[in-house]
Image: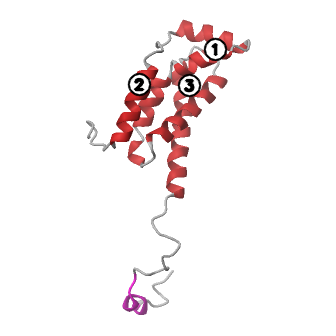
Amino acid sequence: MNNSNNTMFIDRSNYCISILMEDVKKYDVLTSEQERELCERMKTGSKSARDKLINSNLRFVISKAREYLWSGVDFEDLFQAGTIGLMEAVDRYDATKDVKLLSYASHWIECELLKAVKDHSKHKCDRSVDDTLGADIDSRTLLSLDRKSVV
């Protein structure tokens, strides 16, 4: 299935996204006032206030994670990385600064998504341990190389 950006989604990703969206729709988008109130409650140790701040902003994490599907990282891993970024932002957020939580959290979410993409590409390997080095280069090519052309 293609989206408007010509990004190819595998069926599994679409299925995961739709399930997550159904879950996330249970939480209303918060107003600035609600965010401030929840932050105040969170500072006094309210776990439920923290959970509500996180759950109410997962729509944004889903939308950001979808932007990174081009990377080949599974959607579930992208969503998890984005959620970690959101949790970090919620823990560091200062509601007195007159900035919406999502504006602040965007940076943290992007950092975690980029980390996930980087880790994925670092561990991605096109060759097996059994492959011999230079097996795709024939002997004539090797003989034609002289010391001046090899850096």
Q: Where is residue 21 in the image (x, y as percent from the top left)?
A: 41, 25
Looking at the rendered structure, the secondary structure element under dot 3 is: helix
Q: Position of residue 100 (x, y in %)?
A: 53, 17
Q: Say whether residue 138 is magenta.
A: yes
The residue identified by callout 3 is 104
- The Cα atoms of the two marked residues, 1 and 2, are separated by 21 Å
Q: Nearer the viewer, mark 3 or mark 1?
A: 1
The residue identified by callout 2 is 21
Looking at the rendered structure, the secondary structure element under dot 1 is: helix
Which quadrant holds residue 1?
Answer: top left
The correct choice, above or below, for 85 with respect to 127 in the image is: above
- Magenta residues (range): 137-144
Q: What residue type is labelled 2?
A: Met
State the residue lying farthest toward the right.
44
Pick whichever of labels 3 and 2 is earlier in the sequence.
2
Residue at point 57% right, 28% down? 86
The correct choice, above or below, for 118 with respect to 134 in the image is: above
Q: Do the residues labelled 3 and 2 touch (CB within 8 Å)?
A: no
Dominant SS of magenta comes to helix
Q: Which amino acid does label 1 sit on?
A: Ser
Q: Which mark is residue 48?
A: 1
Q: Nearer the viewer, mark 3 or mark 2?
A: 2
